[in-house]
Amino acid sequence: MRGMRTLLAAAIILAMPLPRGEAQDIGQPGLGLELASRLCAQCHAVQKDRAQSPNGQAPRFSAIAAVPGMTALALSATLNTSHRSMPNILLEARDQADIIAYILSLK
């Protein structure tokens, strides 16, 4: 069931129109891991070797990365969209790029 929700969320995000004229910012995965460990690990399994997230409703980062067609743009849209089950964490553009680069490095 959880996998279906993740796939559904990814499909919705991927169906969103692309912003025009914006280049995708490439971040640093190592810094992204540090940030994610501090900001996201209370709910998400941040490291690839974690079998389950601390919060059963929060998908593992490796599961997010494994969604077919997952891109930096899709992750950016997710991080910039409110979710009832996720706190709204406002990230600087560089920090967001680093977390996205880390998640995509888990593919």
Image (cartoon, rainbow, N blue to C red):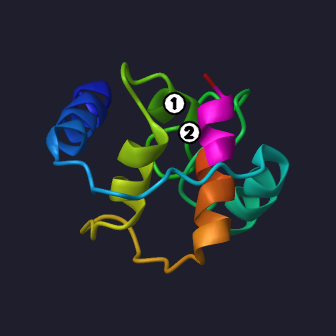
Q: Residue at x 60, y 78 (%)?
A: 92
The vertical placement of 57 against 50, above or below, is below
Q: Residue at x 48, y 43 (%)?
A: 72
Q: Residue lying farthest front?
A: 21
Q: Is residue 20 left or right of residue 26?
A: left
Q: What secondary structure do most residues of the magenta stretch adopt?
A: helix
- As measured in the structure, the alpha-carbon distance from the residue carrying label 2 to the one carrying label 1 is 6 Å
Quadrant where the N terminus is found in the figure: top left
Which of these two is toward me, 35 or 84?
35
Asked if residue 103 is among those painted magenta in the image, a careful observer would answer yes
Q: Is residue 15 left or right of residue 100?
A: left
The vertical placement of 66 against 15, above or below, is above
- Position in image of residue 94 (x %, y %): 66, 68
Asked if residue 10 is among those painted magenta in the image, a careful observer would answer no
State the residue position of label 1: 65
Q: Quadrant of residue 48?
A: top right
State the residue position of label 2: 61
Residue segment shown in magenta: 101-106
Q: Which three-letter amino acid code belongs to the residue tagged 2?
A: Phe
Contact (CB < 8 A) between labels 2 and 1? Answer: yes
Q: Which three-letter amino acid code belongs to the residue tagged 1?
A: Ala
